[in-house]
Amino acid sequence: MKIILASPRGFCAGVVMAIEALDRALDLCGEPLYVYHEIVHNRPVVESFRRRGVVFVDDLRDVPEGSHLLYSAHGVAPAIRQHSKERGLHAIDATCPLVVKVHLEAVRFAREGYQIFLIGHEGHDEVIGTMGQAPGCIHLVQNEADVERLSLPADAKVAYLTQTTLSVDDATVIINSLKRRYPQITGPSRSDICYATQNRQEAVKELSPEVDLVLVLGSRNSSNSLRLAEIAEICGKPAHLIDGAEEMDDLWFAGIETVLVTAGASASDLVVQECVRHLEARFGATVETRTIRNENVSFPLPKELREMASDASNLHDTNQR
Ligand code: SF4
């Protein structure tokens, strides 16, 4: 068996920053430390932090007043920030800057009087946070049928935005459908679908034709990971979306000569390497890494943490004197 290891794969810059932020916040603030929603949509990552005393909540009423609360990479609506302030919580904002970009676009379009169509998946944390930036002005559009049902007049002042983790091809179909109904529609100056989503999808598209089966490491609630498995299937290859090697079934590999292994933007390379080791041990697999694009993106830690770290270091210096 041959394994083709897709590159880039796994953690994106936003996820690296959010995980480092939580790690650093645990050091600086101690436990219990609260996180609004899952820090990233990945079960092994969330469970490892839970074991270290992090409490993930979906409702701010579950956070005791005065506690430290970290916002996940997916971002939150302004109403959540306000509620958190009213409860006297110390917020640390680990929203990915590329999600913040979409939030700012929503605020700008709303201020300029646009009705906004947000292309995304209902109920996703990022979509809830983005819709909350301009309540009353944003309409969720999930597919072409939703576009058909839109009731705004043909000459309405309209704009579109997208969730950052969509399938580029699916989003293009919906955007084209919006453009047919509203030729005057405007959009973001640069695609909202982030570099990490695009690169991981491109790698699957480019490499799938060479393999018999695709393994995607990632959780089922990860939009990014789900899209990779869907793209492999669209390319005509069977695909399995798994959290780790323990979910692999040897029967999947009967008669399989070449396997593409990749990972969604929230899945750690540790689980990828576990799967590779499993295939090496069970099937004598050899590994070839194929890089379709180099990534060189990083984001700074949230400013609240940088300030806390600086205060702690000043205190330490004073005590030393
Ligand atoms: Fe940011 Fe893209 Fe990663 Fe989401 S997938 S956290 S938008 S870099």
Image: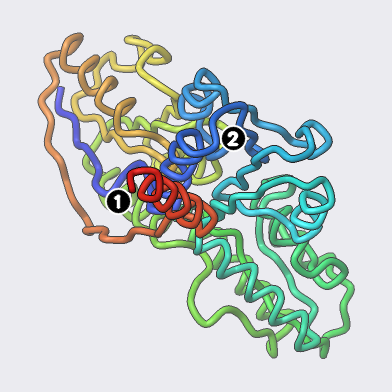
Horizontal side of 320 relative to 309 (left or right) equals: left
Label 2 or label 1, whichever lies nearer to me, is 2
Task: Please rate how many residues cluster around mark 1, counting C-alpha atoms within 10 Å: few if below 14, some from 14 to 19, many from 20.
Answer: many
Check disc 2 and report the residue beneath it: 221
Secondary structure at badge 2 equals loop
Query: 96 or 116, which lies in front?
Result: 96
Residue annotated with mark 1: 203
Give the quarter of the image for residue 279: top left
Q: Look at the picture and state if 261 lies above or below 245.
A: below
Percent x, y for residue 206? 27, 52
Residue 96 pos. (x, y %): 51, 57
**Residue depicted at 71% across the width and 76% down the height:** 107
Q: Secondary structure at mark 1?
A: helix
41 left or right of 24 in image: right
For the N terminus, the quadrant is: top left
Classify mark 2 as within 8 Å of ligand 1 or not, answering yes or no.
no
Question: What residue type is disc 2 on?
Answer: Asn
Percent across and percent down for residue 237 are 37, 36
